[in-house]
Amino acid sequence: MKDEIIERREEMIELFDAYGELLTKTQQDLFKEYYLYDLSLSEIAEDRSISRSAVNDTLKKAIAKLEETESKIKLVKTKKSLQKRVEKLEKAKTNEEKEEALDSLKEYINGI
């Protein structure tokens, strides 16, 4: 369960890094406070003199925007796929493995 929570948090931060500029200033600020500074919804609400549900609603809208954008643009997915292929190339020991990994990388890049 904890691993899933950590993975979800990391996923949200990756999406924010890629698309955070598309959010409103308030969404950006609340996202940072919750995901990067690890403040609770109640702490954020108290600091800003707003309701906990207002913080929650704003975060939900921000997350929906980030996920919607990724589903259309797929920047994070593409980055991860490229990273895997580069790692495979770096780990290749024989010339045949290197050539195969390089071909895979080239094929993927040409398909983008």
Image (spheres, rainbow, N blue to C red):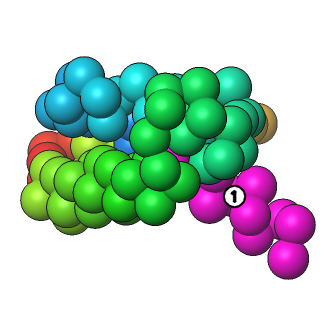
Q: Position of residue 72 (x, y in %)?
A: 12, 59
- Between 42 and 109, the residue placed more toward the observer is 42
Give the residues in magenta: 1-13
Query: Which three-letter amino acid code belongs to the residue tagged 1?
Result: Glu
Residue, far bottom? 1
Q: Is residue 106 visible?
A: no
Quarter of the image for residue 19 reads top left
99 or 77: nearer the eye? 77
Left or right for 68, reference 77: left
Q: Is residue 22 left or right of residue 91?
A: left
- Residue at 41% across, 24% down: 29
| Element on which disc 1 rests | helix
Majority SS type along the magenta span: helix
Q: Would you place residue 8 above or below residue 81 in this image?
A: below
Which quadrant does the N terminus fall into? bottom right
Q: Looking at the picture, does residue 75 appear above or below residue 90?
A: below
**Neighbour class for label 1 at 10 Å: few (<14), some, many (≥20)?**
few
Could you tell me residue 68's position as x and y percent? 19, 61
Would residue 88 be counted in the magenta stretch? no
Q: Is residue 4 magenta?
A: yes
Q: Total of numbered circles in the picture? A: 1
Write the residue at 44% across / 40% down. Answer: 50
Observer-nearest residue: 8 or 86? 8
Residue occupying the point 47% across, 50% down: 51
Q: Quadrant of residue 57?
A: bottom left
Residue 4 in which image quadrant? bottom right
Is 56 drawn above or below residue 94 in the view shown?
below
Disc 1 target residue: 7
Residue drawn at x 27%, y 43% is 75
Give coordinates of residue 48: x percent, y percent: 49, 27
